[in-house]
Every structure is written in C-alpha cells, then in structure tokens.
Image (spheres, grey):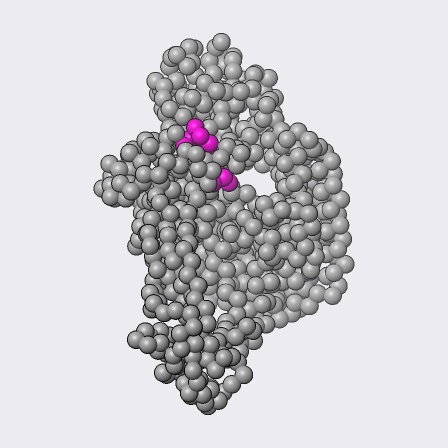
Amino acid sequence: MGKALICAEKPSQAKALAAPFPNKNMKTHIAIAPCVMFPEGAVVIWAVGHILELFRPEDYSKEYQEWSLDNLPIIPKEYKLKVIESKRSIFNNFKKFLKDPDISVIIHAADPGIEGCLLLDEIFFYLNNRKPVKRLWTSSLTKDSVVEAFRSMKDNRQYQHYYYAGIARQRADWLVGMSSSRALTCLLNQKGIEKTFSAGRVQTALMSIIYQREKEIENFISKPYFDLIGEFQFGDAKLNAKWFSNESEHIFDMDEDMLEAFSKYCQSQSAIVNTIKREEKKKRPPMFYNLSSLQMHANRLYGMTPANVLGFAQTLYDKSLITYPRSDSQHLTPGEAAWMPVILKNLGELENYQDLTKGATRDISQDSRYVDSKKVSDHYAIILTEEKVNPLTLPKGEQQIYDLIAKSIIAAHYPDYIYDTNGIIIRVAEKFGFRSSGTLVKEEGWKKIYKGLSTNSAEEEIQLPDIKEGEVGTMTSGQIKAGSTNPPSRFSLGDLIKIMCNPAPYCADQEDFKNSELQLGTEATRSGIVSILTKRYVTVSKNLVYMLPEGRVLIEALGENNYLTSVLTSGKMERYLKQIQKGEGSVTSFVKRTEVITKEIVEKLIKDAATWNFVEFAKDIQKAEEVGPCKNCGAPVLERESFYGCSNFKESNCDFRISKVVAGKPISKENIKKLLTTGQTSLIKGFKSQKKPDKMFEAFLAWDEDKNKLVFKFQQ
C-alpha cells in the first residue's frame, strides 16, 4: 500500500498520534517505523492552526489598499486563499510530503468538527492533492483511543459537507466583516473618531446585549425601602419573620416614623400561624462539562478569562489528560461511559481524591443525564482520560481545570443532595403577612465534593421551630432595616459565555427558533469573541464588564434592528450551515445571499450616518488616547491604529505623524511620550538596517526641529 502521510492540526497532536507506534522525531516530521498498523511505515506532519487564509481586499486589487466608501461593498468574483507568510515553512512541508511519490495514502487527523475538516481539507484542495484521503475521527488522544481511531477510519469524502459548511461560514463572515468594518470606520472617521472599528454577526450581536444592559443600569432609578423583621413567640417557640404582601417584598410607602408606629401596632395585635409548608427536595449532581460550562464555572470560581480556560484545557488535551476540550455536549456515549470505573480507580490512587472516590458508588451507565448517544454529535463531554497523572505536578491553572473535571466525574457517581425547605406564613391582625423560611440538609450527597469552593451556591441551613398551623402568639419586637432597590447586575466574563450559549432571553422575538438554535458563536470561537470585545469595546474590572465609548458608538451607529446586532442573524445563518453540513444546502446560494445582505448593510450605514452625532463620544475616545503635544503645532497627539498623529490635522492640515514601527522595530507608547515631551526617546535596541536587513543596531529616536522630522541619534 505504500507509506501513509498522517496530517495533524498541531505539533502536540502529531506526537500523540505517533505515540502508540515505534517512531522517531525528525524535527520537520515524525517517522513511524513499519508496524502492524502501518506495514510500510508512516510520516506524521502538522499544521499550526490555519496555514491558509482568505485574500485580504488589497490582495484582490490595489484600489482596496485605501479604505474608502467608494469601493464598498467588497465582493470578490472568486474567493481565493493564500499562505500565511509566518507559516510558509509549514506549508512547504505539506507540499513536500503530499507530492512525495513514496506516500500513497493521506490520513486527515485534524480535530473532529467543521473547523478541523476545513483546516486540512483547504490545504489538500489548494495543493491539488489527488491521493486518497482517509479521515481519523477521535475526541481522545490516549494511546488506546488513537489506535482504535486508526482502525475505524473512513473515507474523507464522507465528511466533505463539514468542509463545505466551513468554507460557507468562512466566506460569509469575511464578506460581512470586511465591508461593514470598513464602512463603519470610514463613516466614523468623517465624524471625527479616528479609530478602526470591527463588526461581525457574533461580536456585534453580543455587544448589542451588553449595550442594552448598560442602558438599563444607566436609566435605573433606585428607590429606598424598609423591611420590617418581627420576632414572634408561639408558646415556647421563637422565630423571626419578614413582612410581605402580594404586591411587594418591601415597604415603599412609609417613612421611618410611620413604620415604627406600624411595628408597635402589630405588636399589640394577635398573630396566628396561617400556613406551614414543608417539602423535601432533591438536586441531582451537576452534568459533565462542555467547554462553555467549564469556562463559566472557572470564571466564577477563579476569575479565569474564557481564553485562559480554553488554553489550560487545550494543554491538558495535548498532554492526553482530558478529552477534546472544544466540545458542545455534556453527555457521553455508552462507549465512553465504560471508562468511568478506570478513571475513578485512577483518581482513587491520588491523595487529593482518595476519600472523595469512596462515596462514588452510583452506576451512571444507564443514567440519561450523563449517558445519551442522541445528545452527542461530533464530540462528547469533557472528561478525564485513562492516563494517570499527579495533578499537583501541573501548573496552577491546568491543575485547577483538571480538578474541576475530576470532581465533575466523582460527583456524577454520588447520591443526590437532599434537603427540606420549610416556609411559615404568619398573619397579624388577620391582614398583615410575615414570612419565615429555612432549609434543613438531610443528605449532603454530591455537595461534599465541592466543599471549600466558596462561590459554589449552597442553601443556608436554618432550623425552624416545631409549631403548628392555627397556633396563636404575639409579635414581641420589630426591627426596621433600610435598603434600596438595585439596578440589574453587570455581566461578568463568564456571563458573556452564558449569553452566547443562550441569548434567547435578550431577544424580543425568537420567531420559530428554539433557544438552542440562537447560540452565538461556537465552543471553539466564543473565547476569541470575548477577547476581541475586551480589546476594542469593553473594559473589565474585578471580572465585571463595562462598556467603553467605542462600544457605545458602534451599537448606536448600527442602530436598532440591524442585521449585525440581531441575535436572529446567527440563528438563521447557523440553521442553513447545518443544512449544508448535512448535504441539504448549497454553498453558492448561501454566499450569494450573504453578498446581497452585505450590500444592504453598507447602504444602510451610509444613509444613517447623515443623522449621527457622536461629538461627545469622540471627545471621550480621543482624550483617552492623548500621548503628548504635537511637535509642529502643539495640539494633542493621538494614538491611532498604526501611528501617532496630530489631532489638529483637519482644522489646520497639520501632517505630524510618527509610525508605530520604525526600521522594523515597534516603538512603545512610553517612548513616544518621552519623545514628545523631551525631544528624545530612551536608547532602543533592535532597529534593522535598510541597506543590510540582517544587521541590527541601537539608537535614540529624536525630533530634529530644523529638519522637522524624526532622526536616529547614536550613542557617543
């Protein structure tokens, strides 16, 4: 059959795929010696993420080098790919081995899912591969799982619709993102906001929800209120209860003096136990993690950003310690569930988990909360593999993520958490209500696993006295507590992931979409979307999200009911992409429709811009970016996307500007500030000579007042 060429998505994955077989790392590839699985041997090569990208507008035509409304929208006649220059050597390695006559079969071994299929398939098409391609599909990189996956390979053509869905999404996002970002930037530049704006169907829909919450907080009017806490006596039994009515939990229409009088009145009247409600409740152990639920929990517990969580989980996966992290499922198939006894046994050998695993006696193999093949698509829930490791040897972040996943597995095998809820309603003077409630834990169950994790919600245990309905007593005293209503809470970074998983509560009209169909982004892209927003449109303090002026301008410029701010946009798009993935939809039709929508977006922005007024926001945005006085006219110099320029360029045509990169060396903002105030930077190392690019030199940057330009100044 000849040699097999195994193509992985990343170096760590390549090592894991070669690990079960006799192999030698040859730096540019891993050579697998002839063995039972590969009688003629095999070669393993790897990408480093996507090594191809769609042409940028300026690659199609030089006219697009300048951002202008005149050439929008940008709709290519043909969508072309190019090699990412920083990954040219990786591409050349693929080219070399795909053309190697000794290679007779290609094995596509990227991550299972749309993006994994796209990442390698686009390389095979770009290089016009004609050799047969097999698809390896596995969510686990343990040796046993890898061997089984090689035995179960299918013809890659069976997954071609995953690739089609990938290119459809890629082209649609490019179309909308490129033209709308350029249109917004050009139009806002005309309004005095010299900044680059980015837009896209996911990031702007999420920003719209953040904007809504910001407005709710701004417009909220806090109202003062009082609570009256009465102490009641029924025979020998005492308890505290708070006033309530059918309309409100608080007292809004009395001042403190009136409330004192009301309290004394209640103390002079008889009190009767109106109703007592006791109910036993059970809470099942938490479900297994998918990536989003892991990101939400780790953010709440440890303040980790979604990107941090994905990074730590990816590293654990690369080390073969957990299963595929970008999973959207919280269930296992019976095959994976069969590994649970082995995983629990391994955990039981670790000091951290020895005592906890003793209570993990429940059999979950038939429990549909955890094991359900119908709820597993490309990937199953994130669980540990059968590989043994002492988590204390891992870096802190990896250790915390490993611990959460380990505890989710142990907890699933524990009994339910069982508790009683008790509620007592007391009537005073036959018309005023007071309520007391409490919780009594009967069986701690799985909650034992999470002791010590302070942010894990737990019911406060309050034992209410043993009294009976109809008993008569008195209110012996009253305590008045002042308070005020609070605005809606700010979103945390974890909340943003939760919103993207289910934005339906923030959608005025869901039309015929189920909640699950309105998700924003995918497990693989959500952390990246949050990172974009935190770099451009929001700031985060103590894990709470605050909107920047740039974010407000973005959403107000787009306006209400815009294609880009609507949650329904992603719902409609993803619904059709799923049809393509199933072989029931057309890539051409989908892209053509997106081209029409892109044209409509640009036309609407140009029309709406006539009524925009962002003068105050422009001041806020520009003020935040002042770095010093202009060397020509003294006006503030502002930080732009790729340079520092005079803010007075429109009024007086001042052309003062300094590039952020000089002679191949990025110049820090601190050095620019020093240059503008003192006339010279600190000594900077790493400049590249124009005549001899391989030669590096060090110098000061200085402003030559006579020549009115930036010059190098060398150390004496």
Give the residue drawn at x 31%, y 53%: 451
The image quadrant that residue 312 belongs to is top left
Front-lying residue, 704 or 184:
184
Locate residue 472, reporting x and y percent: 40, 77
Residue 107 visible in image: no
Magenta segment, which residues? 327-337
* Outermost residue to the front: 470
Q: Position of residue 145 (x, y in %)?
A: 40, 26
Q: Residue at x 54, y 48 (%)?
A: 501
As drawn, the residue found furthest toward the left would be 351
Horizontal arrangement in the rendering, residue 697 relative to residue 117 (left or right) = left
Answer whether residue 352 is visible to the viewer in this image.
yes
In this rendered view, identify the residue nearer to me: 396 or 286.
286
In the rendered structure, does residue 367 fall within the stretch colored magenta?
Answer: no
Tell me where residue 264 appears, x and y as whole percent.
42, 88
Does residue 331 show up magenta in the picture? yes
Residue under the image location 35 percent in, 76 percent down: 234
Exactly how many numbered labels are in the figure? 0
Q: What residue appears at the point 77 percent right and 58 percent down from the top-left corner?
A: 607
In this rendered view, identify the residue nearer to me: 79 or 660: 79
Residue 650 falls in image quadrant: bottom right
Q: Position of residue 533 (x, y in %)?
A: 54, 54
Work out whether 261 lies above or below 139.
Answer: below
Quadrant the C terminus occupies: bottom left
